[in-house]
Image: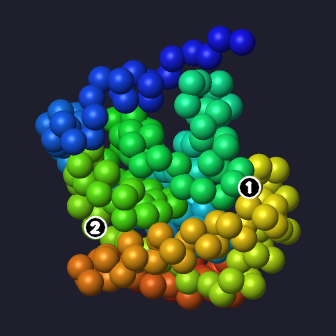
Amino acid sequence: MLRRASPLAKLISAAKPSRLNQAEAGITSKARTPIINFVLGGPGVGKGTQCTRIAETFGFTHLSVGDLLRKEISSNTEYGGMILDKITKGKIVESEVTVKLLKIAIESNEADRFLIDGFPRSEENRVAYEQIIGIEPEVVLFFDCNEEEMLKRVLHRNQGRVDDNIDSTMERLKVFEAYTLPVIRYYSQKGKLHKINAIGTEDEIFERVQPIFTT
């Protein structure tokens, strides 16, 4: 079966990250620079649920990196197989692919306030984002939850995701600790990180989030 050329493939073939500056990226060259907020946390911590509520309450556009990657898989593009292999194994997809999917999503959306859910997952992700998109995040949310609770949530959420199994989840937890925690420390040192206790009901957790966007 022939795989179709996706916008991602065209973008990647056009230029490498090291040769892109903000003007070439096409985002900050618009009449306005979008407001970007990152949302981080381990698997099953409830990022997606809280992002939906934040977006509805405060007028953000929610971009889930996981959803963008799964859409690329389902679209049967030339990168879909590679992405599927990485996700199934609980690994991090190549930064260039992830960041350029984000770039396409932001450019194709008329909104100017975004919640980017599940990104950056590594220092490499962060550096690639700065090279390709280059918009400093206003806020970085970190939903904090213990490993036992995250594992329980993932294995009971029944969303039909290829990575919602014990082996993939355990690997994702290892990846989170090894690769994402350094990103969290980086934004904490920059004074942008807001740590949220993710234990409790959906309403209780959202109550902890709201002051960040109302002050």
Vertical position of residue 93 compared to residue 11: above or below: below
Give the labeled residue for mark 1: 163
Between discs 1 and 2, the one toward the N terminus: 2
Provide the secondary structure element on which disc 1 rests: loop
Q: Is residue 2 left or right of residue 159?
A: left
Amino acid at circle 2: Glu
**Image coords of residue 65 (percent x, y):** 52, 51
Q: Nearer the viewer, residue 55 or 98?
A: 98
Give the labeled residue for mark 2: 138
**Image coords of residue 44 (percent x, y):** 69, 70
Q: Quadrant of the N terminus?
A: top right
Q: Quadrant of residue 80?
A: top right
Q: Is residue 43 left or right of residue 141?
A: right
- The residue located at (50%, 84%) in the rendering is 196
Q: Nearer the viewer, residue 205 or 44?
A: 44
- The residue located at (31%, 51%) in the rendering is 128
Q: How is the image coloured?
A: rainbow
Q: Quadrant of residue 126?
A: bottom left
